[in-house]
Amino acid sequence: MSSFESLGIRAEILRALTDLGFEKPTPVQEKTIPLLLTGEGDMVALAQTGTGKTAAFGIPLLERIDAGGKRVQALVLAPTRELCVQITKDIEHFAAHLPGIKCVAVYGGANIRDQIRGIQRGANVVVATPGRLIDLLERGAIDLGHVQVAVLDEADEMLNMGFQEDLTTILDRTPKEKRTWLFSATMSNEVRRIAKNYMRAAEEVSMGGGNKANEAIIHEYAVVMARDRYIALKRFVDADPGMFAIVFCRTKQDTQELAENLTRDGYNADAIHGDLSQQQRDRVMERYRGKSLQLLIATDVAARGIDVSNVSHVIHFDLPGEVESYTHRSGRTGRAGKTGISLSIIGVRDVFKVRNLERQLKVHFTYVRVPDGAEICERQLLTLIGKIKSVQVDEEAISRFLDAVELDLADLNREELIKRVVSLEFNRFLKQYKDARDLNVDMASKDRNPRAGGQAREPREKSGFGRSSDGPMRSMFINIGTKDGFDKGKMLGYLCGITGLTGQHFGRILLKDMYSFIDIDSEHFDEAMGHFKAANYKGRKVRVDEGSSGGATGARDFKVTKKKFNKARYAGIV
């Protein structure tokens, strides 16, 4: 591999790269930078997320900027505000020793007047999301008539997000003689159409093909019953104490609910999705980058632009509908030459999706089993021992306390002391996983469904995030619902707060406008009902009753419990 010096980069930028700790260019940088520095045509570069694309276009872009000019000379378009902010920061770092370079980020969710003022002060590089840039164009607050270079970063994702019309509008407002550089992880028909319509004799550079997965990523999948996915997720986390992961869900609601459940069960987790304000998103990302969060729960759109080093795992709690989305998700790990794991926790019905991903990405997905209780306890114990062995001892600070400590522990021999130190941290896992059941679906089961290609049968997925056992459940009717401001996450939090139980003791939650049904483990049902004797919500008396057997688990049972609700309403229970 060559050095950055051999690529023909100017001394000021080389100095900035040295300051940043950049030693050798990545393959995409090595292949594209010389062409973008010397060539005069357009370029389409296909490379996976996390391969160093920002430097690949950012460095040549800076080489072409007239630092004395106060007009917008370079435009970079990105699909999300997180990616927009990240690109801006990277370009500013590359230009640290280039006085006169002014880069402004333009994106929704931030004060548009501040962004306009930034442009008016003489921005020569603008990094923007399409929607906010359209707003500025309509206000006449930005002039793209002097753009020399236009970069479309993550072009496939922008098109997937419905920005095709905006891109057309924006590119039509730029000079025809400009240079256009398109960077994408995949080469969809839409991307090809953009390249054909707005690029002149574009040279195509491909790092392994449009849909080929990053070879630094290990792809794994585990098969469980759909209702056990939440418990399985927790076991994978418990079995790998050093895990630093992004967990993907399909919807904003599922993302928030999963984060709330994990937090309630003692995990360092938080959610990032489109309903958060920019300030909230920044706060979550600051905690995640600082590693005070172990698990970041995200939607596909919200995770775009997340550039965090050392992400060990990408976990697909819900598989995406598109191959391109899987590629983008997985690209959050396996960066900077490090190996990462992309783990899919799926139900039996989704096995065919994994096979489809294998065919299209041309990679092998390794089947892994959900760790059992003994395996988790062993890994936790070894991790604890490793921490004890590697802890740094401040001899001077601790010396004043040692005499008292030794006196208090004088009655314990070496073996007893070791047992107690280990048990102090270890007892929780021993208790939690003492009678843990096997969550793995036996794919060789005799119970086959011929229509599903020989896969084991699985009941229809439930909305709740899990139960701790396969024991029977009973349904509770409660006279609060969506009109009281509840969603499933808030309802689960309310139930746990009133009863003192954990999320594992509750099954499906069926919310209606004025009432709800909740499945509760039979073992804890009477205890939970007892806690509602004096309960109220915002000054309103909360009333509960037992629903029909399994009342929240299906439409048939719901019809029965609805009749019971009507009777209860007339009887004055509601």
Image: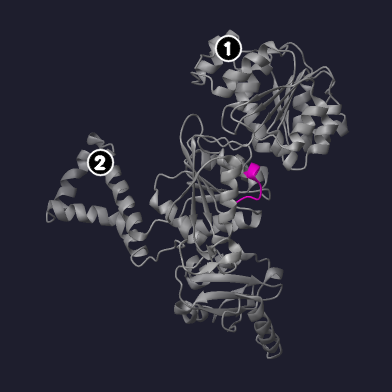
The residues tagged by marks 2 and 1 sit, at their Cα atoms, a distance apart of 46 Å
Q: Which residue is mark 1?
A: 7
The amino acid at mark 2 is Lys
Residue 458 place in picture, x, y as percent: 55, 67
Identify which residue, 61 or 537, lies in the foreground: 61
Asked if the magenta segment contains residue 486, the reply would be no
- The numbered disc on residue 389 is 2
Q: Is residue 365 visible?
A: yes
Residue 178 place in picture, x, y as percent: 80, 18
Whether the residues at callouts 2 and 1 have beta carbons within 8 Å, the answer is no
Identify which residue, 392 or 254, lies in the foreground: 254
At label 2, counting other C-alpha atoms closer than 10 Å, the crowd grade (few under 14, some 14-19, many 20 or more) is few
The amino acid at mark 1 is Leu
Rendered position, 572 above or below 558: below
Q: Is residue 111 visible?
A: no
Residue 300 place in picture, x, y as percent: 64, 46
Query: What segment is highlighted magenta in the picture?
Result: 319-325
| Disc 1 element | helix
Residue 11 place in picture, x, y as percent: 57, 8
